[in-house]
Amino acid sequence: MDSPKAVPGRFYRPELDVIRFLAFLLVFLHHTLPSGADPRLVHMLKGFAPALDSLTDACGYGLSLFFTLSAFLICELLLRERESTGTIGIKQFYIRRILRIWPLYFLTLALGVIVAFLPGVQHSEFSGLGWYALFMGAWYCAIHGWINNPVDPLWSISVEEQFYLFAPWIVKFFTRKLLYGFCAALILVANCWLYYLGRVAIKDSRVWANSFVQFECFAAGILLCLVLRGRLPKLALWQRASLLVFSFTCLFYTCYELNSRFGFTGSRNPGSWHLISGYALAALSCVLILIAFLGADAKLLPRWTIYLGRISFGLYVFHDFAIYTTDHFFIGYISTFKHLPIVKSFEGPIYLLNMSLTLGLTILIAALCYRYFETPFLKMKKRHSVIESEPIQGVD
């Protein structure tokens, strides 16, 4: 492994932006790929329909990749700050996190409230929005199920916020050995919950949205940071590609064989040991994806993927709004002609066109929001940085 040629007071790796975009793209595909339970697809794919369902479910682990990357980067930055200054500015940490997350989070939540007033929306979801406003969206979904509103993906932000409650404190006061022990404790807690949840007849949302379950990915990210000790993996291109293929194969296996995301395939709770092994394998896969990208030659990374990674927060929070918009307007309009033979003949191309429109709309909204709404807050955040890590597009 090579030590990075770091600029003092700065830690930025463009490949991390590519990982952010990859994580978003996986989540986007998870929410837009067709279900293998669709009778038309079952007829067309026959025995391969379950494989399509498993592929769609596996893409959902893009969120786990977000969590693993977040923990790795936060731990890396805090350890560098501690080494550079001898301590960690807890107040500055929370100011940076608030300026990075809260403005866009509450803007999206406000848009969700507007959507809740539209015709055909269940107004009972207002109570859920209240939980989201208190960063308790994950626990609302774990108890009551998914919210019928485009802000639904924001539940994961509440998991991140809960991670931030203890992250700076443990890095400030724990030695590296104690950090290893803390990660082991997080993994133990996550697996105890998985064992319990696998023993009772519950739905997938109670597992997936459980913060303690997702903390296993945060522990994995911290462990990777501790093991690397600031170094970068020195791997050949074929080795990086092999790691990616192996990682995505493992994610598919967790859904196809272990059935770890059982709610989306309409099947039953697979049991404690399948959940434990499935989530552990997913966390390991996320770590291997990070290793596959870390230290990659920046010249091999397409600039557009780096840019989309920088605006990935906006891509993530707005993609469900884009899905909502295209489903109601484009698909809604097309469905008025569904009785026509030509429409039935082009269902596949129409579906692909809708996915393309949805992705394009998501990128457009996120890019505009980044430029005109997020950038002023990012500039303020930069003034509170000890170790800079996030160049501002159009400024740096």
Image (spheres, grey):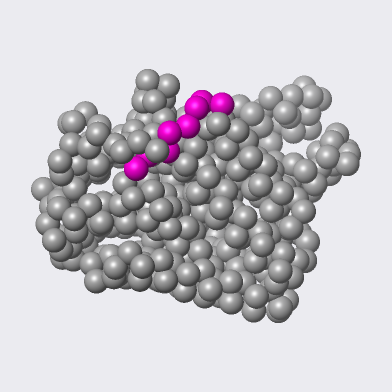
Instruction: Characterize the magenta stretch by its predominant secondary structure.
Output: loop
Kindly identify the residue that appears in the image at 77 percent across and 43 percent down. Answer: 51
In the image: residue 255, left or right of residue 295: right
The C terminus sits in image quarter = top left
Tell how many labels: 0
Q: Would you say residue 144 is visible in this rendering? A: no
Look at the image and give the residue range highlighted in magenta. 231-238
Q: Is residue 391 magenta?
A: no
Nearest the eye: 76 or 266: 76
User: Residue at the spot x=77%, y=53% of the render?
Assistant: 257
Task: Answer whether residue 350 is visible to the viewer in this image.
Answer: yes
Residue 262: % across, % down: 71, 60
Q: Quadrant of residue 273?
A: bottom right
Give coordinates of residue 385: x percent, y percent. Answer: 15, 50
Q: Quick check: 210 above or below 97?
A: below
- Image-based side of 49 in relation to 133, left or right: right
Residue at image position (33%, 64%) is 176
Magenta-span inclusion, residue 232: yes
**Residue 237: image location, x then y, percent:** 51, 26
Which image quarter: residue 148?
bottom right
Q: Is 25 on the left or on the right of 303, as rendered?
A: right
Q: Is residue 198 left or right of residue 110?
A: right
- Measured from the top left, where is residue 76 in percent x and y? 30, 52
Classify residue 312 by image quadrant. Answer: top left
Q: Quadrant of the N terminus?
A: top left
Q: Is residue 312 above or below residue 88?
A: above
Residue occupying image coordinates x 13% and y 61%: 86
